Image (cartoon, coloured by chain):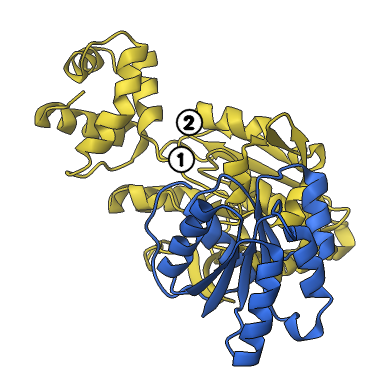
């Protein structure tokens, strides 16, 4: 099925309004490939017919299916390798020292897709950071697409998926064979709560010590990227870390973030100034009164 | 950068050779574990030892598991990185291969990106960008 230029522009605008994802000129092939199954599912003989209906019913199951079909869900275990070495060697030990009184860590993995990244983080915590053993560590993993979240929640991966980036030692330690697939252990799954979330909407109403937002902002306009980062900052603890994808950067003037290089990765840290009242309680909760300054 | 591909399937050897050559490796082939050992002896004498071997499991004459055990028991070959590439997908087999001395494990079928990922995990050099399709 082909899509005409005007319909392509409309679909690109619709998707940008709903998800901040930018579909540039030249991505018609992507839209055609991704929307053809949606058209068939909804009984449309052409993408013309689909977009005609979409124009009058944007807030509908059709609208949701169009947005989901056009989100890019590529992910893999230990993607890019180096950020997880930085997590293991620098970020998590730093947080373990800073949170040694509460022994509690909260992590947000945004754009978690089919779950490989949050499970990777969980494996690093369990295998590689002895100082965090016995801690209260939990992770919120979110994505715009409920389809990918369902798969992430199920924690079942194919041979092709476990081949991508997952060390064999971790495969046998953290997965069991189930039919033709590989199932994540209950111990890892119990650390993670999967929930739908749109990055251009309000941030999750929690405070996090570490935010992973990798390889998603590259699809956003500069303006939407700044809005998302400004929103993310508001749910980071005063000394929390933010990690983006390898080729991504946060603008130097995002209020509340400072950039530093740790190991082979660039990370961002919430700067301690401008700590709203609700964030300071994240650090002082459960701390004995004698330990507060 | 030299590599050795060991598989009794000529088609699979071609696929793996193409992937590794695309990543900048000079690749030799062997059709079973015994041929591979013979190659390592010659390469050792000539000073052209590979740094990496991709090893199928089920092969005639000498299978990949036995090849790996033999390599790991040979001091002058301890520097060779061994990656099993096999249809054996049960975790018990993965455990056996790792215990025998395999450094990594890929389940067939695989995409070229899977080989790239494993090389990165192992800290092996990659000197070119890879383009390809699932194998």
Quick one: label 2, few (<14), some, or many (20+) residues within 10 Å? many
Residue extending furthest toward the top = A43
Q: Is residue A292 visible?
A: no
Q: Which tint is chain A? A: yellow
A77 or A207: nearer the viewer = A77
Q: Where, quadrant-wise, is the N terminus of chain A in this rendering?
A: top left
* A19 left or right of A163 in image: left
- Which residue corresponds to the image point at 56% horizontal and 73% vertical from the top-left? B3
Residue extending furthest toward the front = B61
Count of residue discs: 2
Quick one: label 1, few (<14), some, or many (20+) residues within 10 Å? some
**Residue A291, position as x, y percentages in the image:** 85, 64
* A156 left or right of A27 in image: right
**Residue A200, position as x, y percentages in the image:** 40, 39
* Above or below, comparing residue A97 to residue A77 in the picture: below
> From the viewer's perspective, is the residue at label 2 or at label 1 nearer?
1
What residue does disc 2 label?
A145
The answer to whether the residue labelled 2 contacts the one labelled 1, judged by CB atoms less than 8 Å apart, is: yes
- At mark 1, the secondary structure is loop
Q: Quadrant of residue A7?
A: top left
Q: Earlier in the sequence, mark 2 or mark 1?
A: 1
Q: Quadrant of residue A175?
A: top right
Q: Which tint is chain B? A: blue
B67 or B119: nearer the viewer = B67
What residue does disc 1 label?
A73
């Amino acid at each position: 099925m082909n899509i005409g230029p005007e319909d392509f522009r409309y679909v690109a605008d619709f998707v940008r309004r709903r998800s901040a994802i930018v579909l540039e000129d030249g991505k018609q092939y992507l839209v055609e490939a991704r929307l053809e199954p949606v058209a068939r599912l909804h009984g449309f003989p052409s993408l013309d017919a689909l977009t005609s209906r979409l124009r009058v019913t944007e807030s509908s199951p059709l609208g949701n299916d169009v947005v989901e079909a056009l989100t890019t869900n590529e992910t893999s275990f230990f993607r890019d390798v180096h950020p997880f070495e930085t997590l293991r060697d620098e970020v998590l030990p730093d947080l373990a020292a800073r949170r040694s009184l509460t022994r509690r860590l909260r992590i947000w993995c945004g754009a978690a897709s089919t779950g490989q990244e949050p499970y990777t983080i969980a494996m690093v915590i369990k295998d590689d950071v002895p100082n965090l053993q016995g801690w209260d560590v939990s992770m919120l993993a979110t994505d715009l697409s409920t389809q990918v979240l369902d798969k992430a929640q199920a924690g079942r991966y194919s041979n092709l998926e476990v081949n991508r980036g997952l060390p064999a030692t971790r495969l046998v330690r953290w997965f069991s064979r189930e039919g033709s697939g590989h199932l994540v252990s209950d111990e890892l799954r119990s650390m993670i709560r999967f929930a739908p979330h749109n990055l251009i909407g309000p941030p999750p109403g929690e405070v996090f010590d570490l935010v992973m937002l990798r390889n998603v902002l590259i699809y956003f306009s500069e303006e939407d990227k700044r809005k998302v980062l400004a929103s993310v900052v508001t749910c980071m603890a005063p000394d929390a870390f933010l990690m983006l994808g390898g080729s991504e950067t946060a603008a130097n003037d995002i209020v509340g973030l400072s950039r530093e290089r740790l190991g082979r990765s660039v990370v961002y840290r919430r700067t301690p100034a401008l700590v709203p009242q609700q964030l300071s309680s994240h650090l002082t909760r459960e701390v004995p009164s004698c330990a507060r300054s | 950068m030299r590599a050795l591909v060991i598989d009794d399937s000529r088609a699979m050897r071609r696929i793996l050779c193409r992937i590794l050559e695309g990543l900048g490796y000079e690749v030799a082939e062997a059709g079973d574990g015994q041929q591979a050992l013979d190659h390592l002896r010659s390469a050792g004498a000539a000073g052209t030892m590979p740094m990496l071997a991709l090893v199928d499991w089920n092969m005639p004459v000498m299978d990949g598991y036995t090849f790996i055990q033999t390599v790991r028991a040979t001091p002058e070959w301890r520097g060779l990185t061994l990656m099993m590439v096999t249809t054996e997908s049960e975790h018990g087999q993965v455990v056996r291969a790792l215990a025998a001395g395999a450094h990594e494990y890929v389940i067939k079928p695989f995409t070229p990106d899977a080989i790239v990922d494993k090389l990165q995990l192992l800290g092996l050099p990659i000197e070119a960008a890879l383009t390809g399709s699932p194998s």
